[in-house]
Image (cartoon, rainbow, N blue to C red):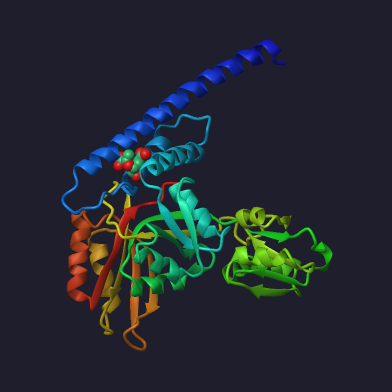
Amino acid sequence: MMSEHELKALRLRIDSLDERIQELISERARCAQDVARVKMGTLAEGEKPVFYRPEREAQVLKRVMERNGGPVRDEDMARLFREIMSCCLALEEPLHVAYLGPEGTFSQAAALKHFGKAVVTRPMAAIDEVFREVAAGASNFGVVPVENSTEGAVNHTLDSFLEHNLSICGEVELRIHHHLLIGENTKADSITRIYSHAQSLAQCRKWLDSYYPSVERVAVASNAEAARRVKGEWNSAAIAGDMAASLYGLTPVQQKIEDRPDNSTRFLIIGNQDVPPSGDDKTSIIVSMQNKPGALHELLLPFHTNNIDLSRIETRPSRSGKWTYVFFIDFLGHQADPLIRDVLERLSTGAVALKVLGSYPRAVL
Ligand SMILES: C=C(O[C@@H]1C=C(C(=O)O)C=C[C@H]1O)C(=O)O
């Protein structure tokens, strides 16, 4: 057993390490302030400064993970640095980030995971409102869900890209754990109704079929809204995540009830900023082709010949005619890469319309 003496000596060492860490964080923050001063000093007439640099932040986080020698896990170490950078950036510009609300949604969790906790998050009532808020310049960035590993595409988000001229500046992936939650007045053995967002009900379908086969499933606007409703009802439960549970003071009857243990959602960061290459990037485009034989082959050929990795292809009805479609395509690489430039040039000659939504760093965390 460790002696009192040893314990005291170790705590003294920790105190002195903390002092050094704190000094270094302050020094780092002063450096970031100097970077901001340099950025301000090199502006052309009328040009606005760009303080937030997603590609640089992705490189910093990647390097942190690469050089990590333990015992702290790579992801945990990166999360600590994520918060340090977030605080450094907030000294110059407290970013305003709109997300699909209300408070306590997974979109808010995604916003905080991506930007760190020193940003101001602003809940919006619908995905389209997140787009409008950012397009109007009322928030710097927006966070919207785009696909779930169990349930597939979030069509509202894809359709909003057709209506707004915003770029994708980043992506963030979140493991989604759902819990069955009740309030202090709920009678756990008399539950007759379970509220949740339709996507979450679908992600827990098998579990619900096994444990609550005859209980009414009510789809509401968000998981946070489900949690809010349960507070006042003795016979209802909600399916929602940790943030909503703690925000509304609910307790889990059963945790992690999602059917697939790797259930994850991918979110996009939308903004008005073009992001330079980070060295490990993705590009997203919308493209529509003429409705003729071989059109899909023609669309995919440039990717194949240039050996570009497609990570996703999604089809949505186009706004311009019945039974005509647009393709949403994500692939690895940055639009500044010569190979990608070549793909985009070849696509634009064969396509009816081509819109590059943006190139952005692949999610690090
Ligand atoms: C310091 C900079 O500005 C911001 C702060 C960063 C940081 O704290 O490391 C990184 C990128 C930018 O979001 C920079 O551009 O290097």
Q: What residue is rendered at 73% in x and 55% in y?
A: 251
Q: Nearer the viewer, residue 298 or 316?
A: 316
Q: What residue is rendered at 57% in x and 57% in y?
A: 176
Q: Nearer the viewer, residue 60 or 36?
A: 36
Relative side of 164 to 119, left or right: left
Q: What residue is rendered at 40% in x and 56% in y?
A: 171
Q: Which of 278 and 11 is in front in this view?
A: 11
Task: Name the residue furthest bottom.
Answer: 322
Quarter of the rendering containing residue 335: bottom left
Task: Name the residue furthest front.
Answer: 46
Q: Is residue 42 visible?
A: yes
Find residue 174 and report its horizontal and vertical position in percent: 51, 54
Relative side of 307 to 21, left or right: left
Task: Name the residue furthest top.
Answer: 5
Relative side of 252 to 363, left or right: right
The quadrant where ligand 1 appears is top left
Find residue 222 and report its horizontal and vertical position in percent: 58, 67
Quarter of the rendering containing residue 212: bottom right
Task: Using the image, determine if residue 102 lies above or below residue 39.
Answer: below
Task: Using the image, determine if residue 324 lies above or below residue 246.
Answer: below
Quarter of the rendering containing residue 181: bottom right
Name the quadrant of the N terminus: top right
Find residue 316 and report its horizontal and vertical position in percent: 39, 77
Find residue 358 and report its horizontal and vertical position in percent: 30, 60
Q: How many discs appear?
A: 0
Task: Using the image, determine if residue 173 lies above or below residue 87.
Answer: below
Q: Is residue 264 visible?
A: no
Q: What residue is rendered at 48% in x and 36% in y?
A: 77
